[in-house]
Amino acid sequence: MTSHRTSRAPVEVVTLDTQDERDRLAMIMMQLDMALALAREKRLVKVESYLESALAEARSINKAMLN
């Protein structure tokens, strides 16, 4: 029997030094979005409102950085 190895892409280590401001902001937005989904699932209305505001602010900053 022949074993077949699949080639995998090399692992990329992400650190503060390898990210720029846009990468960091994208990561924060992703984390806020996941936290918001969890807050909605758990019906945490006050937390949901806070996270929506934070996500809107992050999106506004992201838009400003793109322009």
Image (spheres, helix red, strand yellow):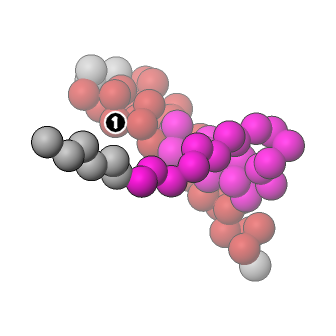
Amino acid at circle 1: Ala
Residue 15 lies left or right of residue 48; in this view the side is: right
Q: Quadrant of residue 54?
A: top right
Looking at the image, which residue is at 45% across and 42% down?
33
Q: Is residue 16 magenta?
A: yes
Q: Nearer the viewer, residue 14 or 41?
A: 14
Q: In the image as oriented, which residue stretches furthest toward the left?
A: 1
Please say if 26 is above or below 17: below
Seen from the viewer's position, the closer of residues 67 and 18 is: 18
What's the residue at 42%, 54% (across, down)? 7
Q: Position of residue 26 (x, y in %)?
A: 62, 52
Please indicate whether residue 5 sits to the left or right of residue 46 in the image: left
- Which residue is at the far bottom? 67
Query: Would you say residue 25 is visible in this rendering?
Result: no
53 lies left or right of 1: right
Q: Position of residue 48 (x, y in %)?
A: 41, 31
Q: Which residues are magenta?
A: 7-32
Q: Residue at x 67, y 69 (%)?
A: 63
* Residue 56 visible in the snapshot: yes
- Frontmost residue, 30 versus 43: 30
Label 1 residue SS = helix
The C terminus, quarter of image: bottom right
User: What is the quadrant of the N terminus in the image?
Assistant: top left
Using the image, determine if residue 32 lies above or below residue 55.
Answer: above
- x, y percentage for residue 39? 36, 26
Was residue 10 drawn as part of the magenta stretch in this picture?
yes
Q: Which residue is mark 1?
A: 37
Which residue does the image show at 76% across and 38% down from the upper left? 15
Relative to 57, say whether 67 is above or below: below
- Left or right: 30 in relation to 22: left
